[in-house]
Image (cartoon, grey):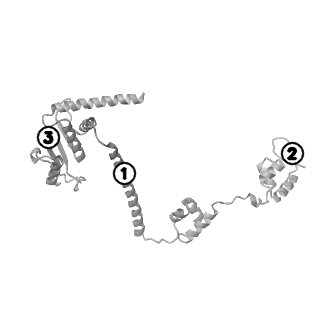
């Protein structure tokens, strides 16, 4: 006879011992807790567990532990002297799990000297740097190829922006309207000269000045810049030397340091006005484009 739940809020069941006998019998027949619950209509988990207390669950209800095999294998490898990294790579499990599984086992003896370990770490770091450098190179190469040919208008706009970023500019209190462009990047110099050619500025109106640290290879720098711009030495003014400060440590050293090249255009007032006006036009166009994109 099945028992019903007693009235009231106490949640107690009548004839507990009778229920327990039935629950134990069902358990021994191989029923799961869910099946016993449905059979006896006992929906209180605490009471249900008390009814079958001491009775082991049937084998078919036991879930296999998926990590048991991994755990045993990890312990075997640890006993063979494997490190956490090696076990992780072999089994594909986390180091935290490995640590729990093998922490009672003795640590393997160190098989590498500190020098050998440092060499391995250095080799791994060098490989990471190589991969990073290759990724950087590929990104730059894709960007370079994406540019393609420059139209006259594109070169003109590039030149205006280039000059306004790196060239000399008038001040309200000092109106000179001179063209003076200074840079140490050979590519910037080449683009600026191509821009001057686009505007029809004769090379006879162009003058150059090398600016370099006095402790650098001054003759070598002068020769380099002359070759880059394809100008005779007569187009070059006297080189400007930067005095050495013994309290500072120079970082701009080495074979690639050639100082800066100053490019000036004679009779350049009209050109300067055109540059300034063009730059204002670029700013206004960019502002209008930005407003369009926001609306």
Instruction: Give neighbour class at mark 1: few <14, some 14-19, many 20+ (Cα, 10 Å).
Output: few
Residue 80 falls left or right of residue 18: left
The residue singled out by tag 3 in the image is 203
Helix, strand, or loop for circle 2?
loop
Q: Residue at x 61, y 66 (%)?
A: 72
Disc 1/disc 3 C-alpha distance (Å) = 37 Å
Residue 227 falls left or right of residue 88: left
The x, y position of residue 284, in whole percent, is: 31, 28
Q: Residue at x 17, y 43 (%)?
A: 262
Helix, strand, or loop for circle 3?
helix
264 or 146, which lies in front? 146
Disc sitting over residue 280 in the figure: none
Helix, strand, or loop for circle 1?
helix
Instruction: Give neighbour class at mark 3: few <14, some 14-19, many 20+ (Cα, 10 Å).
Output: some
Q: Earlier in the sequence, mark 1 or mark 3?
A: 1
Residue 78 falls left or right of residue 204: right
Determine if residue 205 is in view.
Answer: yes
The residue singled out by tag 2 in the image is 4
Q: Is residue 209 above or below residue 92?
A: above
Disc 2/disc 3 C-alpha distance (Å) = 109 Å
Which residue is outermost to the left? 234
Q: Is residue 266 above or below residue 22?
A: above
Determine if residue 175 is in view.
Answer: no
Q: Is residue 213 above or below residue 126?
A: above
Comparing labels 2 and 1, the label whose residue is closer to the camera: 1
The residue singled out by tag 1 in the image is 138
Is there a contact, CB below 8 Å, between mark 1 and mark 3?
A: no
């Amino acid at each position: 006879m099945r028992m019903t739940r007693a009235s009231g809020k106490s949640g107690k069941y009548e004839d507990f011992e009778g229920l327990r006998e039935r629950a134990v019998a069902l358990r021994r027949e191989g029923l799961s807790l869910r099946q016993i619950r449905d059979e006896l209509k006992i929906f209180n988990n605490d009471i249900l567990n008390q009814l079958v207390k001491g009775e082991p669950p049937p084998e078919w209800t036991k879930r296999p532990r998926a990590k048991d095999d991994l755990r045993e294998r990890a312990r075997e490898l640890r006993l063979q002297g494997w490190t956490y990294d090696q076990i992780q790579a072999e089994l594909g499990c986390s180091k935290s799990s490995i640590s729990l599984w093998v922490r009672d086992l003795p640590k393997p003896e160190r098989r590498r000297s500190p020098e050998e370990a440092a060499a391995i770490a250095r080799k791994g770091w060098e490989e990471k740097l190589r991969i990073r450098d290759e990724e950087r190179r590929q990104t730059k190469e894709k960007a370079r190829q994406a540019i393609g040919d420059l139209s006259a208008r594109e070169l003109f706009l590039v030149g205006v922006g280039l000059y306004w970023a790196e060239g000399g500019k008038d001040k309200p209190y000092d109106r000179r309207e001179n063209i003076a462009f200074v840079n140490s990047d050979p590519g910037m110099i080449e683009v600026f000269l191509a821009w001057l050619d686009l505007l029809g500025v004769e090379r006879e109106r162009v003058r150059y000045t090398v600016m370099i640290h006095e402790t650098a290879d001054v003759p070598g720098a002068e020769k380099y810049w002359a070759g880059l711009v394809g100008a005779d030495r007569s187009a070059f003014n006297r080189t400007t030397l930067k005095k050495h400060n013994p309290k500072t440590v120079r970082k701009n050293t080495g074979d690639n340091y050639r100082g800066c090249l100053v490019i000036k255009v004679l009779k350049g007032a009209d050109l300067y006005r055109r540059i300034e006006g063009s730059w204002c036009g670029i700013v206004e166009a960019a502002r209008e484009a930005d407003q369009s994109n926001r609306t």
